[in-house]
Amino acid sequence: MKGKAPEESSLLALNQQEEVVDLLKDYPLSASEDEEDNDGERKHQKLLETIGRLDGKNRQRLAERSEASLQVSEFSVSTEGTGEKLELAELLAPIKPSSSLGTVKKRLKKVKNKKTVELPLSKEENERIHREAAYNKTSQDMDKWDPVVLKNRRAAQLVFPLEQEQVLDAPIEEVLGAWKARTPLEQEIFNLLHKNKQPLTDPLLTPVEKASLKAMSLEEAKQRRAELQKARALQSYYEAKARRQKKIKSKKFHKVLKKRKAKEVLKQFEKLQKVNPTAALEELEKMEKARMEERMSLKHQNSGKWAKSKAIMAKYDLEARKAMQEQLTKNKELTQKLQVPSDSEHDEDAEEDSTLIPDIVNEVQMSIDGPNPWMQKNRGINTQASHIQKKPVAGEESEPEEEEKAGAEEDALLQEVEERRSLWKGSEVNQGSQKQGLRTKAPKRTEEDKEVLAELRTLSKHINKKAKKVRQVGKQHVSPAPAAPKEPSVQREEQSLLDERPERVQTMEDIESLGMEEVSQEQKQLRPGAERRRQRRQQHNHPEQRSPPKVKQEPMIDLHTIITVKTHKANSSLSFPTIVDEEDCDEEVTQKQIIKEAFAGDDVIADFQKEKCEADKASKPKDIDLSLPGWGQWGGPGLVISARKRRRFLIKAPKATPRKDKCLPNVVISEKRNIQAAAHQVNVLPFPFTHQYQFEETIKTPVGTTWNTQRAFQKLTAPRVVTKPGHIIEPIKEKDVESSSSHLGPPTLQRKAQQHAHHRRRRLKKAP
Amino acid sequence: MKVKMLSRNPDHYVRETKLDLQRVPRNYDPALHPFEVPREYTRALNAVKLERVFAKPFLTSLDGHRDGVNCMAKHPKSLSTVLSGACDGEVRIWNLTKRECIRTLQAHEGFVRGMCAHFCGTSFFTVGDDKTVKQWKMDGPEYGEEEEPLHTILGKTVYTGIDHHWKKDIFATCGQQVDIWDEQRTSPICSMTWGLDSISSVKFNPIETNILGSCASDRNIVLYDMRQATPLKKVILDMRTNTLCWNPMEAFIFTAANEDYNLYTFDMRSLDEPVKVHVDHVSAVLDVDYSPTGKEFVSASFDKSIRIFPIDRIHSREVYHTKRMQHVISVKWTSDSKYILCGSDEMNIRLWKANASEKLGVLTSREKAALNYNQKLKEKFKYHPQISRIARHRHLPKTIYSQIKEQRIMKEARQRKEMNRIKHSKPGSIPFVPEKKKHIVAVVK
């Protein structure tokens, strides 16, 4: 290395020379010098400026232009040395205004007016803005959950899973869709099913079933169902009615029923005659045979043992008499020769039929003797019927209606009705036709109606007067009848009935005779409830009419009695407990006495009083006596502290608050703090409560079944969160937001509706 | 003599069928049933005592792993199936009703860092230390078939966590960045970063399914939106957050398990202050999971205990621990909200009741009514000292107990110092910072 050293040094020298040459080559003008020059110039300039400023005046700065070539660098355009920006206008100024360049100028001006575009933001800032925008957006999105969350937090009870999955009742065909017949047995079964066109997979119904479905429309089916329902209801009504009738014990009722049935049979027989004469003949023969049998036998002839015994009793016993009468009538009925009635004679026949029963006899008896409840009832109905007759309908039109109403009644009763009607008719005719018109017009209880009633009353009075005379005569005729209720009397009754027939002649005698009957009836009357009510109503309607006939006053009195009874009852019921109390009091008194006797020695009550008094005293704060004997005066045995001094040194206790048991006689309430209880008591008001009483209230209200009904208990103890074991609880869904935001109703309801819709859709899909 | 007869309507006392309950007429006149408060108080006292008597939350431990259980996953469709991944790369599938392992597979070399199930329950994903993401069938391989993943994705960096979208075939992994993957592709759809850091966990929001939350080791929690492919906001806490969990019933609420022994419940819309700070743990909180009812969450801690917090409470309502349970690394609340699973360092998975004194099995209606009544009574009298004392009482291991004491002393000292500082300085010069805000370092937009 040392040997080479001189060479190296020479090399170094050479290098240095070369460097210098290089430098000269690279920088033809030495940059450092140039810069120095430049600096100098700048300094000079600055100096000039500062000197200029010292002047105080604002001198116009002269723009100096320097050669650009020197300052051009390859990196950027430097404006060093120039005091001003280069303006576009300056560049444009030298251009001569020519047509070709005008447009260019304008454009350039426009460009000049536009602002420069700002620099693009740095990447970080850009990202940050993006993030902020995104965050704002998502957090705004989240706001939609607020109501749901709030609702769930406040909910008294939450049941999880929120979305109750419903059990889909998929048809078996769907479940077994993938299943295929493999074994020969299965295949055979399937073959059979195919042959019978049984539904295998999709269609649930067989072709036959489908056809039947098509055959009957829904409306038809509904109609038919309604019809069936109606029929069934009717059937049940009839059954009930039949059962009721069967239960009725009244002989009379059954008699009448039997009669009616016989009549119906007769009617049918008539029909049969027209339709099927041979069958009718057979029937006829049967009837004839029955008649013959009756005639042959001595049945119903009042000749048997029983009848004889009755005959003996008949003198004294009304019942016996009646029974005998019945026997006779039955006999007559059965021995009556059957006549095939013609259409024209029908009415008369019917009347004849009815005349078979000698009920006139009965009637007379009734009028004489005491009331029979069953008969009374009928009578009541009759009178009712007559009243009804009074009201709306006039003349012939009323007849069928009347018959309908009395349809359930007996024919004999029908006859009575007939009589009444005739009576009314007579009176109507007497009164004139204008009232008829009124009646037809007024079907309801109106003012007109009232008038009519009043008129009728006066009319009946009138008739009564006339009837009295006839009655005296009639009595003579009637009086022997009950004594000898035998064939001749019956005949007479028949006659009398026949007498009533020509009422339409409207002679005065007829009216009189009828009036007599009416009076006799009214006199004996004690009307049943319905009638009474009617009358009461009437009286309410006519408070001004203080002169009703005597007969009608009677029920009014009855009414009063009823009311008094009622009130009496009510009073008694009200007074009942007081009476009991008195009894109890008596008992108590005796018991007290017993107790007193038993505990004669120890007076418990007085002891208690004493105890309470002591407790009261003990709880009261006491005065403190600070006076010292011998302080400030002589002391010793026998010396008493002066009253003045004692007063001076006495510290009076503050007044005690009233004790809690002050008003409770049998209790001592200790107001001392119980340390053992204090360990269980809350001594600081817990957080959510703001007042003591709020907290106390919550503690006071009991929860258990001992104090609450089962329902209330369940409600009170309902847990806040209910979960079903074995059910996966999914996170809340978007659906829940929608349901809660649209205020259609509780989400559960909506969900149900949705499920329903879903279900329907499935069905629809499956249908084709 | 007048005889008074009692006559009653048989409808009031005759049963329609013999299976009906006997009608018991009862007079609810309060005068007839006095002392309602003392009587109910006694019942409440008995109820609360019985609750403590029956509080036996531990059901079983599932053992079989040969290393610490690092992660767990719930089966989305089956309540009785649970998956767990261990630190030796082994994945096990357990049947909870039989309490046994039904399948074992060696998924990775090294840790199984994270796992999640597909939302329809047909497959599951695991990520491991070997830089792979693997998709597995949920059902075991048929006879003669080899245990192989359905798909394997080889990555460039280690993935530390994975979570699956709740509705779509998309999953997200985290590591150096948050990647969002389509199941059909081998490269991520998009990857989102915000600074260079290792992200420890990523979670999809179960309700607003496009939103993700992640926590990184530089102490921050970052929220992302998948639709806009950007991060949304970042909040930096005092210490590192280990995991976070979204509330399944409240879309904007999530809870973060932090290294500073606390859990923070945040409202996504206002990150500058947590809604609640949940204290009680005495060591780092490693995992957190919400109850599916969204009313409570469970946290697993390094202090060898798990705690159950109501979401609106600072303190826990329950603490579970056993002598043998070591640092609890992962915890899950089952989807029927009845049980809690925790996987710990000492290779066991433990099954707990979520409600310690709950009676398991079918209850008769009378039992239910009685339980409800007792619950109501406890609630009613919870402010009474005796009852609250019994209800609060828990046994703690000595270490935790002493640590709690220590923590309390430290906290008091800190508070005292702060108070003194405020007292002895110019008024207003030291601002009062509420406890909630103390742990938030910054919110970055």
Image (tube, rainbow, N blue to C red):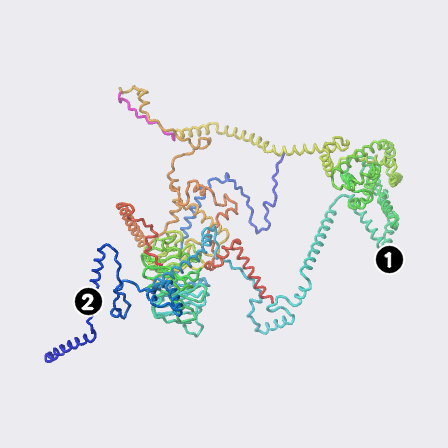
Q: Quadrant of residue A756?
A: bottom right
Residue at figure coordinates x 20%, y 72% from the top left: A29
Chain for numbered disc 2: A
For the residue labelled by badge 1, is the local secondary structure a helix, a strand or a loop?
helix
Residue A745 point in image, percent of width and height: 53, 53
In this picture, is A556 found above or below B401? above
* Res A618 visible: yes
Q: Which residue is mark 1?
A: A278
- In the rendered structure, which amino acid carries the disc numbered 2? Asp
Q: Which one is in front, A450 or A138?
A: A138
Query: Quadrant location of the N terminus of chain B?
Result: top right
* Classed neighbour count for the residue bearing mark 1: other residues with Cα under 10 Å, few (<14), some (14–19), many (≥20): few
A250 relative position to A200: left or right: right
- In the image, what residue occupies the spot 62% across and 35% down? B3
Please provide percent x and percent y for residue A338. 88, 49
Q: Chain of mark 1?
A: A
Q: Is residue B88 visible?
A: no
| Of A200 and A295, the residue lying toward us | A200
Looking at the picture, tell me which residue is in the foreground, B208 or B413.
Answer: B208
Counting residues from the N terminus, which is met first, the one under dot 1 or under dot 2?
A: 2
Which residue is identified by label 2? A37
Dividing the picture into quadrants, the one containing residue A316 is: top right
Name the amino acid, label 1. Answer: Thr
Q: Tell me which segment is drawn in magenta.
A: A618-632
Tally of marks: 2
Asked if residue B305 lies left or right of residue A433, the reply is left
- Left or right, A249 with respect to B136, comes to right
